[in-house]
Image (cartoon, rainbow, N blue to C red):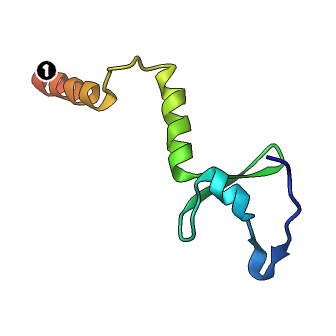
Amino acid sequence: MDAQRVKIVDGGKLVIPASMRRELGISTGDTVLVDVDDGELRVRSVPRAIERARTILRKYVPEGVGLADELIADRRREAERE
């Protein structure tokens, strides 16, 4: 999608154009993540941010491996040794 000019209104509010909200899957009342990356403002939907985090984790954790299950198993082994 091409860049669009928008204005900052009272209170520092930025109005995101409807076409961009639709593309991002953002609706009125949704919570979004906002950060500055290399001098640029980034706006992401929470589901999109979670999806990206999962993609990053999959590089290090094979499919089918549950980190929570592994953590619980580690804690149980530690408890048995005590």
Q: Work out whether 41 lies above or below 73.
A: below
Query: For the image shown, how many numbered marks are present on the structure?
Result: 1
Instruction: Look at the image and tell me in which quarter the C terminus lies.
Output: top left
Q: Quadrant of residue 16?
A: bottom right
**In the image, what residue occupies the spot 75% across and 70% down?**
15
In the displayed structure, would residue 50 be above or below residue 12? above
Q: Is residue 59 left or right of residue 38?
A: left
Q: Quadrant of residue 52?
A: top right
x and y, in percent, of residue 57 in the image: 49, 27
Left-right relation of 4 to 59: right
Task: Return the x and y of residue 21 as percentages of the image width and height.
Answer: 66, 59
Residue found at x 28% / y 29%? 71
Is residue 63 something one can see in this rendering? yes
Q: Residue furthest bottom?
A: 10
Residue 18, position in %: x, y?
Answer: 70, 64
Q: Residue furthest top?
A: 62
Q: Residue at x 17, y 21 (%)?
A: 77
Q: As shown in the figure, which amino acid type bears the numbered disc 1?
A: Arg
- Figure quadrant of residue 61: top left
Could you tell me residue 17's position as x and y percent? Answer: 75, 64
Q: Secondary structure at mark 1?
A: helix
Which residue of the protein is positioned furthest toward the right in this rendering?
Answer: 5
Asked whether residue 44 appears in the rendered view, the answer is no
| Badge 1 density bin: few <14, some 14–19, many ≥20, Cα 10 Å | few
Q: Residue at position x 10%, y 23% from top?
A: 80
The residue pinned by badge 1 equals 81
